[in-house]
Image (tube, rainbow, N blue to C red):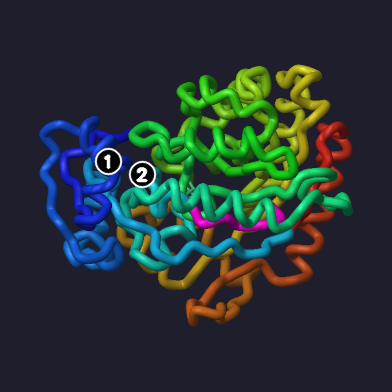
């Protein structure tokens, strides 16, 4: 997954304990100091990088300091979105929204001021007090998404930020960390989360994943990991996303759900829940993808079924038309009732 040869780093990040720890694990990597992890011209953006971004994602790392520490309300995947310990990803899913600000080639940026991030989260958790009203996020704990802009499992290959957050939540009885992942990293099994971290393994039919989830762990591997993660002290949920409508999607999702029912042990089923997220795509990402993975666009880009909406940041996002989306979600919920009735749907969007 990672063979880091090149590091772009803010000087303050290099000088920090976490920065020094990361660099000690990368002997021989060439270091280029940068003023900011935002907008490194030779790295970010899409022009010229289309042909080489898998190489960039494999061999390049950015170290930065996260200056704005803010926790935002969410209410879907989690109650709150915590300031993430990273931004960017070594994987390359064709529909990924994470690169929207730095360009598709963006490799992992690790934030080295992890103590400040953890201290911020602790203060936020303390300020909430106990959760008194159950909601779909969790009946008792405030849930904090710690991986909105990356994949914590991959970050943990080269850095202890994920471990530090898991350890911090272990000591917060009113809160729980949560992150979605498409990568099975067995190192996480040793972190002893004591039930205070929820892993959401992302699932989709294997044929879709082979086409779209570039560089991720295979779907069977993610499913097989569920029991190991539960036994290691994680709560294990499933992130059924993105749901992509293409000929045969109904049968393939039925097969996936029946497979989950066949192979998951009862202890996993008893605590499992799922979120369902229909595909959101984006016109500029569509154009980028045509340059490197046009077959992905044959399923992602379906103008006859999709409508365009300008997002707050001005991007032209594309989603399934309201009626199509509603019917599809109803169908998928029915498939769950039929094939995996133990799987509680936390929310569908
Ligand atoms: S694993 Fe997640 S963050 Fe990484 S490329 Fe895929 S969708 Fe994006």
Q: What residue would you read off at disc 2?
A: 90
Image quadrant containing the N terminus: top left
The residue segment tinted magenta is 78-84
Q: Residue at x 62, y 53 (%)?
A: 244
Identify the image quadrant of residue 72.
bottom right
**Circle 1: element type:** helix
- Magenta span includes 50: no
Identify the image quadrant of residue 45.
bottom left
Q: Residue at x 55, y 33 (%)?
A: 167
CB of mark 2 near ligand 1 (< 8 Å): yes
> Residue 90: image x %, image y %?
36, 44
Residue 58 is labelled as: 1
Say few, some or many: other residues with alpha carbon within 10 Å of mark 2 (under 14 / 14 to 19 / 20 or more).
many
Q: As drawn, is 176 to the left or to the right of 133?
A: left
Identify the image quadrant of residue 50.
bottom left
Q: Residue at x 39, y 67 (%)?
A: 101
- Magenta span includes 80: yes
């Amino acid at each position: 997954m990672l063979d880091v040869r090149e590091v772009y780093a803010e000087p303050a990040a290099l000088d920090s304990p976490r920065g020094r720890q990361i660099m000690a694990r990368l002997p021989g990597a060439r270091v280029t100091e940068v003023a900011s992890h935002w907008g490194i011209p030779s790295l970010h953006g899409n022009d010229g990088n289309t042909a080489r971004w898998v190489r960039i994602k494999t061999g390049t790392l950015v170290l930065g300091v996260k200056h704005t520490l803010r926790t935002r309300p969410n209410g879907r995947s989690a109650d709150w979105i915590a300031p993430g310990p990273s931004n960017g990803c070594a994987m390359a899913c064709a529909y990924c929204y994470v690169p929207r600000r730095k360009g598709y080639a963006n490799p992992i940026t690790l934030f080295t001021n992890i103590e400040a991030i953890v201290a911020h989260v602790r203060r936020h958790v303390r300020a909430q007090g106990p959760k008194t009203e159950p909601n779909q996020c969790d009946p008792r704990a405030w849930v904090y998404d710690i991986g909105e802009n990356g994949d914590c499992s991959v970050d943990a290959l080269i850095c202890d930020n994920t471990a530090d957050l898991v350890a911090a939540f272990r000591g917060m009885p009113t809160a729980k960390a949560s992150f979605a992942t498409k990568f099975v990293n067995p190192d996480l099994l040793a972190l002893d989360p004591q039930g205070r971290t929820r892993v959401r393994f992302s699932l989709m039919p294997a044929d879709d994943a082979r086409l779209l989830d570039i560089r991720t762990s295979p779907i069977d591997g993610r499913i097989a990991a569920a029991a190991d993660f539960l036994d290691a002290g994680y709560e294990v949920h499933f992130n059924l996303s993105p749901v992509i409508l293409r000929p045969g999607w109904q049968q393939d999702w039925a097969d996936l759900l029946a497979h989950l029912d066949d192979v998951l042990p009862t202890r996993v089923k008893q605590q499992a829940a799922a979120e369902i997220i229909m595909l959101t795509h984006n016109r500029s990402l569509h154009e980028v993808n045509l340059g490197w993975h046009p077959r992905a666009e044959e399923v992602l880009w379906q103008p006859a079924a999709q409508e365009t909406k300008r997002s707050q940041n001005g991007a032209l996002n594309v989603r399934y038309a309201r009626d199509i989306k509603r019917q599809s979600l109803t169908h998928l919920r029915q498939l769950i009732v039929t094939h995996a009735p133990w799987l509680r749907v936390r929310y569908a969007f």
